[in-house]
Image (tube, grey):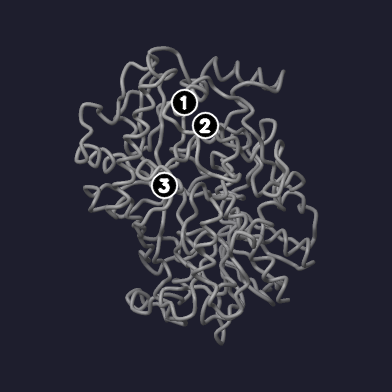
Amino acid sequence: MIESYDYIVVGGGSSGCVAAARLVTEGKARVLLLEGGHSHRHPLLDMPPGIFKMINGSKFMRYHQTVPQEHLGNRVHDIPQGNVLGGGSSVNAQVYIRGRPSDYEEWHELLRGDNDYPGWGWKDVLPHFRGMEGNNRLQNDLHGSEGPLLVSDPGHINEVSRWFVQSVQALGVPLNHDFNGPAQQGVGFYQFMNRAGKRSSAAYAFIAPLQNDPNLKLELNARVSKIDIENGAAVGVTYRDRTGNERKARANREIIMAAGALVTPQLLMLSGIGDAAQLKAHGIHCVADLPGVGQNLIDHPEVPIIALANGKYGYYRQGVGWRMLLNGLQFKLFGSGTILSAGVEAGAFVNPIHPEAEPSIQAFCVPIVYLDRDILTLVENTYGLTVTTVVIKPKSRGDVRLRSSNPEDMPLVSPNLLKDPDDMRTMIEGQRYFLRAFDKTPLAGRYNKIAIPDRSKITDEDLAAHCKRFVKTNYHPTGTCRMGPTGDPLAVLDSRLKVRGIEKLRVCDLSAMPNINGGNTNAPAMMMGSRCAELILQSS
């Protein structure tokens, strides 16, 4: 028997959890939430630093491999995505960043000419951020303290993080107590989506309170293979349940896609929504010719600076052997210690090229030697510090294409990180800028050498070669089913997140973004889910 629901949400990541929860609680609707991954309830996921034991291999991650990147010497690198209820919010480093008002004003300028435009400017999205937020320090026009998403100052700060903040201040960068405040520029300590040593994911914040609500049907390990479309409208989905059996479900009102910026476009294309020529090449009947599906892939590129310490500084080996036992005991007995840290505590937003302009580089201070698994052996694993520089408004664009018509095959992903010359220029200057921090006390004198990049080779050509060898994703793929105004040939969605040319189908994850926000994307993903639910409830 085929079961029917009011709404089906495909993907139980950050945006999908929020959208489903609002439709159930405020809309009193029957919702089926289909998540292809596992339960979020696991001790390593709950603990703020647990992800560092999983990042290079875990069932809670799905590892997309890029196609060979010709401009990077044919490198192939990983793009891990959450394979768990809560998506990225269950496996990330929990940094709470929204972006800046100008990010959303840019969306507003792009979309405001669209018919029935609902508003995507800062004043439109801020209430969603504030309404979700339960901040343990801030409550004002920009921050809320009563929401279900617990946002906290770091529970533990390593001395290396403090040295980083002081040394960057010595470069003339102001101390910033709130990167989500009136100004983003500065150096300081991030806030995190956790509290008292436990992660506050979208799964915990929005879905767990509804576990006994009969209006929410949650299925885990349920992989959707196709959106069922009849007479130009989305009416249901086909999926495999956790036992491997193929099943169908019907939606009486709408289907909301929230499978992420890599899988949502894949599922649209498998369902006949996409570029007609590409679909034809895979033997898929086209029901809506939307050439923008899978285009406009944007990700934040990240490049490390790694320094090797001359003392036992940082978090090296704190998660293994007797140190792990000691840290666990301290947390259990006293509720304190390194387990309260997400592994990154401090960071900065700067513009090395135009210091008075909005930041172009975000930095993360990670008190270990931290590398992607494809370059893991290139630097000695010992006591050290990694400062990663991230281009936060990249111009490079990539794409997601079908590998085949088989839904079990992962899509072909080409992010084109640093392909645009302006992105490379920004990254090079970001690297130069933060290399200078190691010449300032208190960092100066505490590190034997800069392992990468080689400080004797810092010409533009040298640093470009370093960036090409070590660039990786900052885990923020976006934009592959973007909103756009009427008449934009690559716009997949209208400004109400509706798929153009198909009734009863919306997208609410990061693939809907017209352009990426400046900074981490997890809080914006939750905002997108909340905004989507609001738009649905307003129209129902």
Residue 480 locus on image (x, y percent): 44, 64
Task: Using the image as rendered, state which of residue 497 and residue 380 is in the foreground.
Answer: 497
Q: Which residue is mark 3?
A: 360
- The amino acid on which the numbered mark 2 sits, given as a three-letter code, is Ala
Task: Using the image as rendered, state which of residue 382 and residue 39 is in the foreground.
Answer: 382
Cα distance, mark 2 to mark 3?
17 Å
Q: Is mark 1 in CB contact (under 8 Å) with mark 2? A: yes
Q: Looking at the image, is mark 3 or mark 1 earlier in the sequence?
A: 1
Whether residue 12 is situated above or below residue 348 in the rendered picture? below
Give the foreground label among 2 and 3.
3
Q: Residue furthest top?
A: 311
Cα distance, mark 3 to mark 1?
19 Å
Whether residue 308 is situated above or below residue 136 in the rendered picture? above
Residue 84 locus on image (x, y percent): 58, 49
Residue 493 locus on image (x, y percent): 52, 73
Task: Using the image as rendered, state which of residue 139 and residue 415 is in the foreground.
Answer: 139
Q: Secondary structure at mark 3?
A: loop
Q: Which residue is mark 2?
A: 346
Position of residue 378 in the picture relative to residue 354 (left or right): left
Q: Residue furthest bottom?
A: 231
Residue 210 locus on image (x, y percent): 77, 54
Whether residue 459 is situated above or below residue 10 in the rendered picture? above
Q: Quadrant of the N terminus?
A: bottom right
Q: Residue furthest front?
A: 356
Cα distance, mark 1 to mark 2?
8 Å
Q: Which residue is mark 1?
A: 164
